Each structure stands twice: as C-alpha cells, then as structure tokens.
Image (spheres, rainbow, N blue to C red):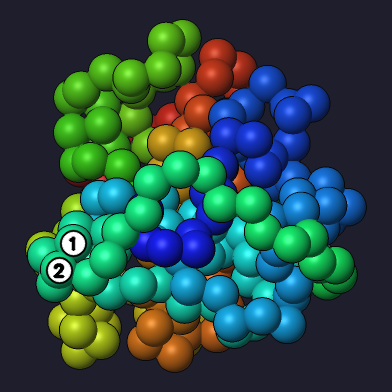
Amino acid sequence: HIPGAVFFDIDKIADQSSPLPHMLASPAEFSATAGAMGISETDTIVVYDGMGLFSAARAWWNFRIMGALNVFILDGGFPAWKAANYPVSAGTPRPNPKTFKASFDPATVRSKEEVLKILAFNSAQLVDSRPADRFSGAAPEPRPGLRSGHIPGAKSMPFASFAESGKLKDVNDLRAMFEEKGIDVAAPIVASCGSGVSAALVDLALASIGAQDHAVYDGSWAQWGLPGETPVEAGEG
C-alpha cells in the first residue's frame, strides 16, 4: 500500500444489522470507525483502490455523505502509483485516533421506498451501472435468488464506461456520455448497481461535471431484485 495509508473495508464500515451487503453505516458507527482510523471530518482525504477506479468511489461517497468535504480520489489508483515507481509499504499502520464528527447528508442516498415513489411520480432519472447483459436480463445475477432485469425506466450506463486505464474520463467526455443517454444532468438523478458500489462511480462522475442533484440507491439490485413486489423490466431499456 501507499506508505501511511489505512484500509477502508466497505464490508465492515457498514450496517452490520442489514442482510444486504455493505449498506451505509449509521453516522455514529461511521464516526467511531473513521476516528479509530485516524481520520477527522476536517482532514484532506485521498482514497484509492487496487483496480485504478472502482471501490474507491464508494469510500469517497461514504466520507462525503458523512460530512467530510475535502475528499479526493487518486487518479489511476494504486496501479498508477506503482507504475510511477513511487514507494510502497507492507504491514498494517497504527494511526493515532482522532475524533470524526459525522454530519449526515440524506440528500445523497435513496431507499427502496423512495425509488418506488420516483417511479410513481416520475420525479427523477434512474441510471444503472451494472454490465449491460445484467441490465437487460440476458445474464444472470451473481448473487443467488435475485431476479434478472432492471428498474423500469432506468438507463444503462455500465461502470466500466466511466473510466479509461483506471482513470475517470475527461469531464467533456462524461457530459457527452450522459447526453447520449438522454439524461439531463441538471435534473434529479439516482444511480443504482448491483450492491451500491459502482453506483458511487456514477455519483462521482456527476459531481465531477458539476451536477447538483444526484444520489445513490444504497440497496440497489441486491435489494430491488429480491423476490417480491418491486417491478422489473427486461431488455435494453
């Protein structure tokens, strides 16, 4: 790892009472964990992952929703760091604890009930960042017991399309991608995916181009795709 870095475990820094994977932790739980990691909400925080750009967006979103505003993602992640021959370390750092005072922002997360209301009133645009064959229902879901398809009316924007060589695409390219899909970035947008991880990459892209009203459906398909009454569509949308 990069010298001095601490590990953000998206499965442990989560709501452990939920049967759904890595759901957002409570502000109190997040504060305790982040503080134990030696992080304050006023710190400048740089997040990276081992793929270049994937789960780092989820950690970025976690910190932002809890009130840490100076949060950035390392362009290219750990692969770019190593390619530049910068120093690396092994072992587990033991940071000095700090106090993290969470200030939860509910505007940047949506529940299943809120997405159902969006469908009823057509009050936001839905973006699904799973691979296209899972969106269409042509490929089965990797989690057993889930239905195939997508939320009715959602637009497919696979997460891999937002990055090149592990780096977020240029803002002009990102704007063009949303425009090509017929998505108005000045209007409300809610992103979903398989379990709330790659949806945060959509949220990152929207923040990067200056969009103001965007959120993540935290339960995503791990919740929506369960057997039940939530409506599901198949096909390319």
Residue 152 locus on image (x, y percent): 43, 43
- Circles 1 and 2, Cβ within 8 Å, touching? The answer is yes
Residue 149 locus on image (x, y percent): 34, 30
Residue 133 locus on image (x, y percent): 18, 33
- In the foreground, 6 or 19: 6
Residue 35 locus on image (x, y percent): 78, 60
- Residue type beneath disc 1: Lys
The residue positioned 42% from the left and 10% from the top of the image is 144
The residue positioned 20% from the left and 22% from the top of the image is 139
Mark 2 lies on a secondary structure that is loop
From where the camera sits, is residue 189 visible? no
- In the foreground, 98 or 24: 98
The residue positioned 75% from the left and 72% from the top of the image is 40
- In the foreground, 107 or 185: 107
For disc 1, the marked residue is 82
Q: Residue furthest top?
A: 145
The residue positioned 36% from the left and 54% from the top of the image is 89
Instruction: Name the quadrant containing residue 100.
Output: bottom right
Q: CA distance from mark 1 to mark 2?
A: 5 Å
From where the camera sits, is residue 42 visible? yes
Q: Residues within 10 Å of mark 1 (few under 14, many from 20)?
A: some
- Residue type beneath disc 2: Asn
Q: Is residue 156 left or right of residue 146?
A: left
Q: Is residue 53 left or right of residue 65?
A: left
Q: Is residue 15 left or right of residue 222?
A: right
Mark 1 lies on a secondary structure that is helix
Q: Which mark is residue 3?
A: none
For disc 2, the marked residue is 85
Instruction: Name the quadrant containing residue 83.
Output: bottom left
- Relative to 150, does residue 183 appear above or below in the rendering? below
